[in-house]
Structure formats: C-alpha cells, structure tokens
Image: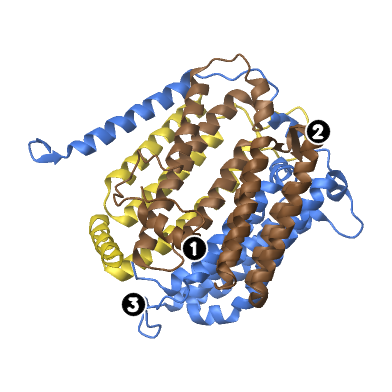
Amino acid sequence: MISMGRYSVSLKAVYVVLVIALFGGLTIGAIVTGGRAEVSRVGSLYLEKGFEFPNIENAVFGVYGMYRFYDTLFELLIFATAVLGITIFSDLESSLDSEKSGLVESHVVSASASFLYPAIAVFGIYLAFSAHQGPGGGFAGGVIGGTGILLLALARGAEETGRKFREDSMKRVEYLVLFIALLIVVLGAFYPDTIYRNLPGISVITVVNISIGLKVFIGTWAILHFFVKHRGEV
Amino acid sequence: MIALLLGVGAYLSGGILSLLFTRHRYRFSLLSWVGALTGISLAVSGFLDSGSVVRTLGRWGILGIEIKIDETTLLFAGLVVILNFFTLIYIRGSKKGSFYCLYNFLLASTFSIAFSHDLFNLYVTIEFMSLVSILLIGYERKAYQIYAGAKYLIISSLAMSLYLIGLGFVYRVGGNLGIRELARSLEGIEEFSLSLGLGLMVAGLAVKGGFFFLACGFRTPTPIALRSFRRFCPVWQLSPA
Amino acid sequence: MSANLIVSAISIVIVCVGVIGLILKRNLLLKLLSLNIVNTATILFFVLIVYKPGDRAPIGPVTGVQFADPLPQALVLTSIVINFGVLALSLLFTMVLVKRYHTLDLRKIEGFVKREFEEEKS
C-alpha cells in the first residue's frame, strides 16, 4: 500500500490506472493524428441506393431493414434469448408481499398514469410505423411502449397489469415475429429488389417495422415486469 | 448462400418450435440436424465445383454482408454438424424444451460464425453465441454456475466493447466492413490508427477466448464453467485448466 | 481540431473511467454500472469517429446536402439492444447470487462459491 498523508492506495490500483491511462493516451493520439483515406466509403453508396426505393426516406432504415437485415435478425434473437433467460428464472420466489410492499403507490401516480398512458402508447406506435420516413424505428417505438406499460404497472399494481397482458399469447406472438424475420431474410436473399419495391397487397417495409416494434415491446415488458415483481431484492 | 441460410434457418426454427411444442422437441432437433446436414453437403458440392468464393448475402453487391465458402469455413461448419449429431444421441430427449431451444440457438450461431466474412456480423454472432452459452452454463442454477456465468458475461461484454472501438478505427480508415473489400481498400496504407484499431480488435477477441488480462476482480479459476459444460456435452472432453 | 474529435477523445476518457471502475470496485452492482458506462461511451465513440463537421441527419431524398454516414448509426442501434440484453441478464444473475448469499461484495461471494464447489467435488 502506498500512503501519502491520510490517503492510502494499493499498488494494484496504481498499476491498473497507469495501464489504462496508457491505453487512453494511445487511443486519443490515434484519434487526433489519424486521417481518412480518400476512398469512396460504403456509406455514401447507402445514401444513393437507399433513396432510390419508392418509400424510403430514412437511409438508416435502409441499412438495418434491407441491406443488413441478417444482422437485425441476430439482434432480435439476442433480445429473445435475454427474455428466454428471464423466463427460465421466472420461478424465483419473490420475497415481496404485494399487499405490504414498501412502495406506496400514490393517487397522483395512479391518476396521471391513466391519462398519460394512451398518449405514450400512440407515440410508440407512431414511431414504430414511421421508421422508413423519419427518425424512429421499431426499437425506439417498442421501448417507449414498454416503459409506458411499466408506468401503468407501477400505478395500478404489477400483478394486475401482468394478468391483463397474458404471457402465453405474448410468447407466441414473439416467436411468430422471429419466424417472419427469418422468412424475410431468406426471401430477401433470393429476390432482394422485388420484395422491397412493390409486392401486391403487402408492404414488406411495414411488416419489418411492425415486427421489430412488437418484438421489442413484448421483450421490454417481460424484462421490466420481472424486475418490478422482484423489486427491492438486491 | 443457400447452405448458410438452410443451416441457420433449420437450427433456428428447430429451436423455436421445440420451445413452443415441447412434446416433439427431440424430433424437431433431429429435423434441424438433417436440414443443416443438407445445407453443408450443398456447400461442399458447390465448393468442389467452383473453389473458394466470397458472396454477398442478398446479392446487394458491396452493400450487403459478405460470406465466404472456403476449406476452413467448411471444416468448422462440418465440425458443428458432426458434434451436433453425437450430442443428440447422448441427450436422447431427457431435457426440458428451453434447453433444446438454447442448444439449437448455440448451433445456429456457431454455424453462422463459420461462414461469416464481415466484421460487424462477426461481432453480433459472437455476442449471440456467448449469451446463449452463458445461459446454458447457468441452466441448473447451482450457485457456482451462476457465479461463473456472471463472470463470463461481464468480462466478455467488456471484450466486445474493445472490439467495437477497434472496429471504429478500422472503418474510419478503410471505409468498408466486409473483409475482402476492406483488404482491397487498405492496400499500402500505413497509419497508426489502423494498427491500433486492429490491435484492439485482436485484444478484444483474445480476452473473449480466455486470455484474461483484464480479470476485473473475478479470481476463481475456469474449471467451474467447464465442469457444468462437460456435464451437458461430454463429447467436449476438455481437461480443467 | 474539430469538435467531433474533441468529443471522441472525451468518450475515450469515459471508457477508461468505466474500465477502471469495473476492475477496482468490489460491489457487484457498481461493476455492472461501470460496464454500462463503458458500453455507452463505446457507442458514443463509434458514432462520432466518422462524423464530418456540417453533416445532416440522413433523412429525405434531398440533393446537394452533405449527409452523415448511415452505416455506423445502424450498427450502433444493434449494439444498444445487445447491451440492454446483457445488462438484463447480468442483473438477473446478480439478483440470484444476492438472494442466496445476502451480500454484494465480490470477495465474500467468491469465498462462498469456492467453498461450495470444493464441497461438491469431494
């Protein structure tokens, strides 16, 4: 232990700070002195080609919804695995008695949640549907919807809200969405142009938006519901 | 391309279906093995015809995700399919539905890593593989298994953040994410930020592979996780380090 | 030196702070918090490193305007969701450990776990 006056610090801490300061210094040096090669970057190509599709005005949607949808499929799978992990552990005994819980839900929260929640839900749905025309996307829309329901759960009681959103049907919808995403990956690998331009009667872009939004909404609600049920236990 | 999609699609659908319909979980896992075997035989026959190729998933050209069919990739993918077969014989329907789901997801992610030739796709599939294997490590819910799972989760998340920082530097210099296009555009460029970026990526993957120079205060040795893994999959007879 | 380079440098400083916290803190929850800081700062770095001063958001088929690169933004969306999943699972594991051993100190939990592992092996 190195001690200077009142403070003492272990030698290990000094080593760690020095090594990480070295890493930080090298990286900042690389940021400041590094340059960019004059190569036509793939991003400008995404901007050009993305705007050629009829409905798409958000180039970022083009990247994650069309060209690199395989990565989005794996991201949805990671989210589904996290939710699956939570459901595997969901039979942990909760030491929280819901009648005598330490948190008192006040009337202010309850009343304001009742009229705030529809606005939050509509905003989340709007963001999920309009991913290809402005900033937003299924991820943001789903998280907003999920936290809106969390607000409702905190106001009215987590068990009552959990009963209303039935877990079985939500699980089935979640896995149906994964199948749809897998189908779009497979179809998009063989007929990339046609399915994103004009299919009669169905718009793949809307399907992608809704499926990502639903999936993230259900997953966020499942995770947050679990942690609200077991609150106060860490 | 057909091989990758067939293999990954078979494993993923087998996993999801064995979670939804738990009575037929073993049959779904067997069917997904058959699907992956078909996929890899198609890949091998295509490779014998035309040699090693680099394709883009979805035929988007430079804008898509690159995959490569090569001797190395076919070797690893074939290894996944063979080990899957022997493990299925050993398990023989004795686990719950969620175990089969996680098992098939693990196989899908390793199958996808074998064929991937794109830096960010590698990041996403490696994260998926580590998340699923950590859930499998902690499946029996003994305390030391949960502890090992938490340790690996935290350390591997830090490692992949290092990888992402390195990827940022490489993308800034190179302009592409697919390895073939990146190699073409980086010919003859010598820059400190490029070397640092590549070094950070390698460091991240090294920490991921077990070279724990950033142990983050977790000190118990590796055998805990290996022991629970051995119980499930005795084909992987790794001796405790 | 343009503003985005300065903020990228600051984000690397935040990464370093997070890594120091992850290594030196003994409380499990503080380790998770530091991990979250590292992940968020990495994402900030990744978005800023390819920004050119004067870029606009890549929305709308307008010509003659300098747009930002859409690829890192899409990659970062994926990364945020992955970090959320990892954080949820690590919090779950922490909760199971704390329910069992009633402490958040990592050294004590390690001692208990080692003892249990030795007992079961013998």
Task: Give the color of chain C as drawn.
Answer: yellow
Coordinates of residue C25 in the picture (x, y in percent):
27, 48
Label 1: few (<14), some (14–19) or many (≥20) C-alpha neighbours in 10 Å: some
The picture quadrant where one finds residue B86 is bottom right
- Taking the spot 61% from the left edge, 13% from the top edge, the residue there is B188
Q: How far apart are labels 3 and 1 at the CA level? A: 42 Å
The circle drawn on residue B50 is 2
Q: Which residue is mark 3?
A: A102
Please state the chain letter of the residue tagged with numbered disc 1 in the rendered image.
Answer: B
Work out whether residue C99 can be spotted.
yes
Task: Give the color of chain B as drawn.
Answer: brown
Which of B83/B3 is in front?
B83
In the image, taking residue A45 as reference, residue C111 lies left or right, namely left
Task: Give the color of chain A as drawn.
Answer: blue
Q: Which secondary structure, mark 2?
A: helix
The circle drawn on residue B232 is 1
Disc 2 marks which amino acid?
Ser
Label 3: few (<14), some (14–19) or many (≥20) C-alpha neighbours in 10 Å: few
Please state the chain letter of the residue tagged with numbered disc 3 in the rendered image.
Answer: A
Q: How far apart are labels 1 and 2 at the CA level? A: 39 Å
Disc 3 marks which amino acid?
Gly
Tell me if residue B23 comes above or below residue A8 in the rendering.
below
Residues at discs 1 and 2 in contact (Cβ within 8 Å): no
- Give the colour scheme shown: by chain
Which of B63/B223 is in front?
B223
- Taking the spot 41% from the left edge, 51% from the top edge, the residue there is B152
Q: Which secondary structure, mark 3?
A: loop
Disc 1 marks which amino acid?
Phe
Same-chain status of marks 2 and 3: no
Labels 2, 3: front one: 2
In this view, which residue lies farthest toward the left? A5
